[in-house]
Amino acid sequence: MAAVRKSSSGGAAAPHKRKLTIIAEDPDVKVGGRILTTEVEIPAEELIPGPRGYRVSVVDYDATTDTLYKPAELPVVAHGSDEESYFLNDPRFHAQNVYAIVMRILARFEFALGRRVAWGSDGHQLHVAPHAFAEANAFYSREDRGLFFGYFTVSRPDGPDKPVFTCLSHDIIAHETTHAILDGLRRRYLEPSSPDQAAFHEGFADIVALLSMFSLQDVVGALLGSGPASPLIPQQDLERDKIRQSVLFGLANQMGSELSRVRGQALRRSLELTPGKAHLDMPEFQEPHRRGEILVAAIMSSFLDIWLARLERLGFLKGREKDRSLVVEEGARVAEHLLTMAIRAIDYSPPTDINFSDFLSALLTVDKEVVPDDTKYGYRGTLIRNFKAYGIEPARQANDDGTWRPSEGTFTYARTRYDSLLRDKEEVFRFIWENREQLKIDDDGYVEVEAIHPSIRIGPDGFVLRETIAQYVQIMTLTVGELKAELGIDPPADMPEDRRVRIFGGGALIFDDYGQLKYQIRNRLESKERQDARLKYLWENGFFDRPADDRAPFAALHLARATG
Amino acid sequence: MATSPLSVTIRSYQVGFGDCFLLSFRYSASDERHVLMDFGSTGLPEHLPKTHMRDVAEHIRERIGKNNRLHAVVATHRHKDHISGFETKEDGSGPGDIIRALKPLVVVQPWTEDPKLKTNATGPGRPALTGEQRHIAMLASMNDVAESALRESAQLYFAKDVQGQLAFLGEDNIANRSAVKNLMDMAPNVYTHCAGESGLERDDVLPGVRVHVLGPPTIQQTDTIKKMRSRDADEFWHLQARALRDFGASGGGAAAIFPEAYVRARGSGFPIDARWLIYRSRRLRGEQLLQIVRILDQQMNNTSLILLFEVGDKLLLFPGDAQLENWQYALGQQQYKDLLARVNLYKVGHHGSLNATPKTLWQLFDNKSKDKTNDRRLVSLMSTMKGKHGHEDRETEVPRRPLVQALKRESSLRSTHDFKAKELYRDTEMDFG
C-alpha cells in the first residue's frame, strides 16, 4: 500500500490503515532460516520523510559517530537479493520498524481507552532515535522528549563481530514506548517511591510488550510448536510447559542472548519464577526490573491459565491435533482482553505511590464494570489466584471481591457545573475544595488537579458508557521531625530530624455519566503505613544521598541494573 | 634484632590529586623500615614542574638513604592517582625506575590484581569462569571503556564541565601498563583481601606490627552482604567496551555505521528539523558516558586495599579510595568495628570524597575530639587538590566541604591542600611508647 501523500490526504478516499513490515521479535528469531517478519496495521496518517507523523518523529542521528542519516520514506521496500542483509543494514528499514511498533503500541492504548493518549514528554511528537549511540542500552527520556535506542556488537566464533540494534527488537521498542505512554497517563509514577512503583513501570511495560505480540496471529502461529508448516498443531505442543518454553514466553533456543543483556532477561524469564514463594520480600527483588518480573509473572500465568482453559473446549481433529488458527485466535482473544484490562486499569489506579495490590484491585474493578458476571471465562478469579500465588493481595481498602469500593457519602455538587467538570481542572479543584472533608483531603498540603480524561467504552448492556477521570495530587514537604509530630509517620531512626522530605498523596476521581462521583481511588498523604515503607526504602537505598538533579531516570535505572 | 617499632614517621608528599605516603617505622637509631603507600597523581598544582613525580621518587630515595632499602610497596588499587609514580621509561628515567632500584622486599596489592586470575576468555556465557575471574575480566573491560571515554571526551560538542570530568575520570581509569608491570615484577607480590594476610608482618619488613586487612572483600564475602545482586555485570562492561571500541571515536573521529549513501550530514550542516534532537542527543551522550565512567571509577575505587596497622595501642588506618561497598563487609564484623573505634590516625579515603568516609565509619572513631589540646585526638591525613573531581552544585566535589569541616572540627587534619607553594612534604610523627 502506498504511503498517504500530501496531495491525496484528507479526502473521502483517504485510507484509515497503513500496513508496514516489521521484524516480528528480533533478528535472531528465525523460521526456516529467515528472519521472522510480519505486516502490521497501524492508523494511517499524513507522513513526511523521517518518518515524521503527528505523534512520532524519527530522527536518525547517532551521537557516537556524529552522523545524521537520511530520513526514510515509507514504505521502505526490500531491495537486493539478500533479505537478511537488508533488514540489518538499511537504516531506513530500521526507521520504519521503530515507527511502526511505536505507533502500534500507541494505537493499542488509544483503542483501550477510547481517547487520544499523550506522551509523558512535552509536545505532541515524540522523537525517536533508532541509532542513538554505541551503547548496550535503550531508554525513554521525558526531558529529552524521546526514545533513544543504542547499538553494539557481539563477537561470533566464526567471522566478524555482529552488530546488534536495539531498534530491531519488538520487545524493547514496545517496552520503551510504554514507558513514554504510562508517563503520560501517570506522571508521578516516576517519582521516587516504594520499590513497587519503579517496578510497576518496568513490569507494566513488559506486560504490554508481551501481550501485544499475541495479536500478531501469523507470528504466534509460526512460533507455536514445530512451526507453521502444518495447519494442525499436536496437543503435546500445547502443554503448559511446552508453551512456556516457546519464544513467546521463554528463552527458546534460537533466541539470541545478546538483546537480553540490554535489559536483563526479565521480560522472558518471568514465568520461571516459581509461584508460592515470597519473592516480594527477597532482597534481590527490591531492584525495579527484577521486582517487575513478579507482576509480569502474575499476569502471564493468568493469561496462560485462561488460554489453556479455552483450548480445552476446542475439539481434536485427526487424533490429538487442534486447528492451529483457532488455537492462535483463542490466544489473541485472551491477550486482547487482558491487555485492554491492564491499560484501562491505569485509569483506576491511584496517581501516586502505586503498589501491585492497587493495580490488582484496579484490574478487577475495570473488568467487573465491563463483565459483571465472571463465571464464563473466570478472568477475575484467575487473576486473583495468580496474583496471590506471587504474594500480591488486592488492596486493603477494597471490597471482599478485590474491587474498589464505590464512593460513599454525600457530596456537594451544587457549586460545580457538570459540563465544566468534564474538562476543566479549575472546576474539578472546586469540587475537591467544596468536598475536601468528605474526600479526606488535608488542606495543609499543596493540592493540584493534574489531569482530566474522558473514558468511553461500551457497557455490559451495549450502551456507550462515558466516565470522566480526574487526577489530583497532594504534595507536602516537611522535616523528619514534623513528619513524626504532625502525621505520626515513623521515618527510619537514623534519618536526621531536620532533613526535609517530600511526601505525596493523591487520588483518581471517577465521575459517571451524570457527573456524580463513582470512585475515589486514593493514597492518602497521611497513610502512615505507606509513607513509612516509602521512606524506609528510599533511605536504605541511598536516595537521599544522591544529587537532586539526576536526569533521565530510565537511563540511569538501566545502567544501575546492569552494573549495580 | 628489632622486635617492635618505637615510632613511625608518615611523610605526606605533595602529589596534587593523588596519594603518596612514606611510612618509616623506627626500630632503633639505626634500624628504620620503609613502606611506600601508593605513589600516583592525576593532576598537579600548576606551579610544579613536569618532572615532579621523578623529583618525589628521588626524594624518597634520599630519605631512605644509601645503606637502606625500601622494605615494602603497597599499591591500594590500580587508579592512576595511586600508581602513576610507578611508571617506568625505556631509558630507565621514570619515577618507577627509581622506586624499583630501592629493592622492595614485597609489593602488596588487592586480590583483583592477581595475574593468575586473568583470563582471555570473552563473549557471553563463559560458564567456566569463576566469580573472581569474571570480576577481573570486568575490571579490564572497564579500563577499555575508560580509554574510549577519554577519546570521546575530545568531542567538542560536549559541555565543558562534562568534557573535563570525562577526561579526568577517563585518564584516571585507563590501564597504566608500565606501572602495573613494574609493580608486578619489582618484588614478589602478595595479593590479599579482607581477613587475608598483608605480607608485611615478616621479620625483615615490619616485625611487631600487626597489619589487619579490612578490604577489599572477596566475591564470596561480598555475596554475603549484597542486597541487590547485579546479574551479568561483567558482560555489560564487556559489551560496553566492545561497542565503544568498534564504533567509538578513534584518532580522526568515528566512522558512520552505515554506508555513505545513507548519510545526510556529519559534524555540521544539520537541517533545522533535526537540530533539537541532535543537541539533546549530544548532551545526553555526554551525560551517559560520564555516568558510565563514574560507575566504573567507583567500582575501581572499591577494589582498594584497606590496611589497618596496629602497634601497641596505636592504630593507623589506610583505606586507599575504598567506598561504602568495599567497607560494608568489614563494617559488618564486630572484631573490625572494635579495632576501628580505636583508630588514632586516619588517611582520609579518596581524597576527601563524601562516599569514601561512610557515616558508619566516621561514627565509630572514638578518638574524634573537638578539643585541640587533647593528645589522643584523632589525626587525619588527606592528600587532595580542589577543582579536579566532582561538582559543588551536585554536592560531589572533592574534597567535600561538609566532610572537611567535620575533619577540621573533630580531628587534627593535615591536608596537602594546605601546603605552601614550595613545600614538598610534611611529616606526622607517632610514638608507640
Image (tube, coloured by chain):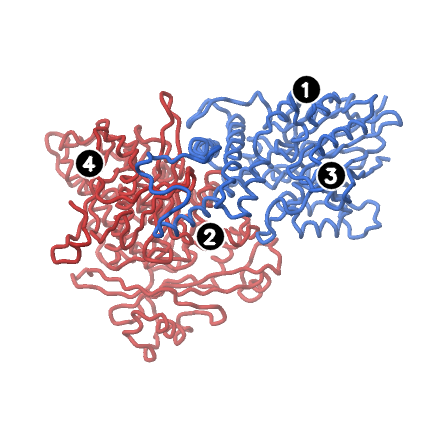
Chain colours: A red, B blue
- C-alpha gap between disc 1 and disc 2: 51 Å
- C-alpha gap between disc 3 and disc 1: 28 Å
Label 1 and label 2 in one chain: no
Q: Earlier in the sequence, mark 2 or mark 4?
A: 2
Residue in the picture at 39% in, 50% down: B277
Label 2: which secondary element: loop
Tag on residue A221?
A: 4
User: Dot 2, crowdedness within 10 Å: few (<14), some or many (≥20)?
Assistant: many
Q: Amino acid at mark 2?
A: Ser
Task: Provide the chain ID for the residue under circle 1.
Answer: B
Tag on residue B14?
A: 3
Which is more toward the observer, A258 or B399? B399
Residue A105 drawn at (x, y percent):
28, 49
Q: Amino acid at mark 3?
A: Gln
- C-alpha gap between disc 4 and disc 1: 64 Å
Label 4: which secondary element: helix
Q: Which residue is mark 1?
A: B188
- Side of A198 relative to A462 (left or right): right
Task: Provide the chain ID for the residue under circle 4.
Answer: A
Between circles 1 and 2, the one closer to the viewer is 1
Label 1: which secondary element: loop
Residue A297 drawn at (x, y percent):
34, 42
Between circles 3 and 2, the one closer to the viewer is 3
